[in-house]
Image: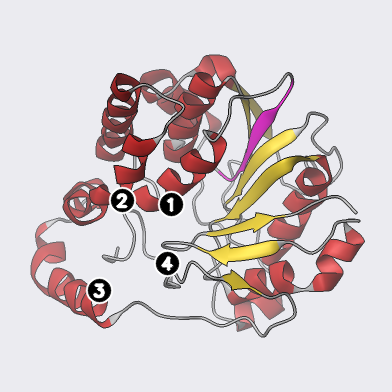
Amino acid sequence: MALQSLGPDRRHASATGKPIALGDPPSDVGPGLLERRLHAWYARWLRPLLPRDIDQQRLKLVYFGWGYWPLLKLATLPLWGRVTLLVQFLRVDWHVLHAHRPNEIASVCQALAARRAQPGEVMVEAGCWNGGSSAKFSLICKLGGYRLHIYDSFEGVEPLGSEEKRQGHDFSGAYAAPEAVLHDTLRRFGDPSVCTVHTGWFRTTLARHPVPDPVRLAFMDCDSAKGTEEVLSGVAPRLTADGVVFSQDYHIASVRQVLCDPRTWRRLGMREPTITRLGGHLASLRTASA
C-alpha cells in the first residue's frame, strides 16, 4: 500500500477541481511534491513496521481523515447527525479494508445530501469489494430517504482486454470478496434495510437490465473501461435532472478515454457531461438526457 490511498495502492491523479472538456486528450497528473516526499518517508520508515493492510489503513487516517470535514457542513442534517455520521465513517475505516479516501466519500455524500429523496429515487454503487463504501453510503441514504442498489460480481475485477493491459492498469481478479463479507459489513457498520444487492458481472446485470428507478447518484468503482461503459449503459439514461455520476477510476487512462469521448454519450442518447476532477481518484459527471 502507498500513502496515496487508505487501501491498496493505485496510481494517483491529483485534483484540479476544474471542468474537463470532452474530446480533450486525457492526462494523468501525478501527486504533488509534498505528497511524494511523504510517501517516500512512509514507505521507508513506517510501512515495514505495519505488515497488515488494515493497520496501514488505520495509520493513514492521521493524514487522510481530515478529508471528512465537509460532512460537518451538511446543511440538511442537524449538527448531532453530522457528528454521528463522521464517527460512523471513521469506525468503518478502522475495521474494514477498502480502497477509497475520506475526501472522496465526503464529496459523494455532499452531492447526495443536497436534498432529500423524492419518491422512488435511488443511489447506485457499482463495485463494492468488502463493503466499506457501501456501509457509508447506506448510512447517508438512510438519512436522505434513498434506497441503495449495490452491484458487484464478488469475483474481483473482470479480466481486462489486451488494450487496457497495455496501458498499464491490470486489476484483473483484484478486489474479490465473498458476498457474505458485504452483508456482514452492512450489518455491523451500515444500514442493510435500505440496500438491495445485485450479484453478477456488470454485463449481465446493469448492461442487460438498466435501473428501473430514477437514479439520483451513481458511484462507479469498476477498475476497467469495459465495466465503466456497462455501468453507464444501465445508469445514465435513468439519471434525474440533477443527477450526478462519480467515477473513482479517473486515474486510469482507458477509463478517462471512455468518459471523455463524446461518442460514449451519443451511444447512450445523452448530452455530453461536465466532468470535474475532484480529490484522489474521483471525478464527477453531470449529464442530462438528450
Cα distance in 3D space between marks 4 and 3: 14 Å
Q: Provide the secondary structure element on which disc 3 rests.
A: helix
Residue for badge 1: 104
Whole-angstrom CA distance, mark 2 to mark 3, is 15 Å
Residue 151 lies in magenta, yes or no? no
On the image, numbered disc 4 is attached to which residue? 10
Q: Is residue 122 magenta?
A: yes
| Label 1 or label 3, whichever comes before in sequence order | 3
Question: Residue at (51%, 20%) from the top-left corner?
Answer: 142
- Which residue occupies the foreground of this view, 220 or 10? 220
Q: Which residue is mark 2?
A: 67
Q: Residue 275: in sight, yes or no?
A: yes
The residue that appears at 65% across and 47% down in the rendered structure is: 244
Q: Which residue is under mark 3?
A: 35
- For marks 1 and 4, give the CA distance: 14 Å
Q: Secondary structure at mark 4?
A: loop
- Residue 162 lies, with reference to residue 267, above or below; the image says below
Given the current orientation, which residue lies at the most extreme top position? 193
Relative depth, front residue between 171 and 33: 33
Q: Residues within 10 Å of mark 1 (few under 14, many from 20)?
A: some
Q: Residue at x 41, y 62 (%)?
A: 280
Q: Do labels 1 and 3 touch, CB within 8 Å?
A: no
Question: Badge 2, how many Cα within 10 Å: few under 14, some, many 20+?
Answer: some
Q: Hey, what amino acid is under mark 3?
A: Glu
